[in-house]
Image: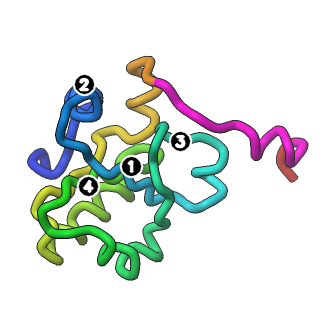
């Protein structure tokens, strides 16, 4: 649903503006540790119901995942609970990266010494 998604450029402008948005990464902790949007908070989709109460229905919440699928589910779920300003980053972290936006992380892969 288009009204539940925010494009990379619009998010970039919103983050630079005066009205802050909470960036909530709904991927698993390991995924978030590898790479993430700067300033994002990791709340896995499986724990979202318990964590949403730390926000008010007036807060602007931008959900993020790898490709925009899980974050769209999170935004839809949040809206059913009355969080009317909940949106998903269209295309997720992949779209953010393709637009040349900054990404934090990488430490977990280096510490782990590769995949097993």
Asked which quadrant contains residue 51, the reply is bottom left
Q: 21 or 62: nearer the eye?
A: 21
Label 2 and label 1: CA atoms lie apart by 14 Å
Q: 30 or 67: nearer the eye?
A: 30
Residue shown at 10% from the left, 63% from the top: 84
Circle 4 residues within 10 Å: few <14, some 14–19, many ≥20: many
Q: Earlier in the sequence, mark 2 or mark 1?
A: 2
Q: Please check the rendered image and state whether residue 106 is part of the magenta-colored stretch, yes or no.
A: yes
Residue shown at 20% from the left, 69% from the top: 56
Instruction: Give the extent of the magenta segment.
Output: 102-113
Circle 2 residues within 10 Å: few <14, some 14–19, many ≥20: few
Label 3 and label 1: CA atoms lie apart by 9 Å
- Give the labeled residue for mark 2: 9
- Give the labeled residue for mark 3: 36
Label 2 and label 3: CA atoms lie apart by 17 Å
Label disc, if present, on residue 21 of the rendered structure: none
Question: Is there CB contact under 8 Å for labels 3 and 1?
Answer: yes
Name the element at disc 2: helix
How far across and down, in percent of the image, does residue 33 sit?
64, 49
Name the element at disc 4: strand
Q: Give the label, 4 or 2, closer to the camera.
A: 4
Q: Is residue 16 above or below residue 27?
A: above
Q: Is residue 8 above or below residue 25?
A: above
Label 1 and label 4: CA atoms lie apart by 10 Å
How far across and down, in percent of the image, does residue 77 sit?
24, 71
Residue shown at 47% from the left, 45% from the top: 66
């Amino acid at each position: 649903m288009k009204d539940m998604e925010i494009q990379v450029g619009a998010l970039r402008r919103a983050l630079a503006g005066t009205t802050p948005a909470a960036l909530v990464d709904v991927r698993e902790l390991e995924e978030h540790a590898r790479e993430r949007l700067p300033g994002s908070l990791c709340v896995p989709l499986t724990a979202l119901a318990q964590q949403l109460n730390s926000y008010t229905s007036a807060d602007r919440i931008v959900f993020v995942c790898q490709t925009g699928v899980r974050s769209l589910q999170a935004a839809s779920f949040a809206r059913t609970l009355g969080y009317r300003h909940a949106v998903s980053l269209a295309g997720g972290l992949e779209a953010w990266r393709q637009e040349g936006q900054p990404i934090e992380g990488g430490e977990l892969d280096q510490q782990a010494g590769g995949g097993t």
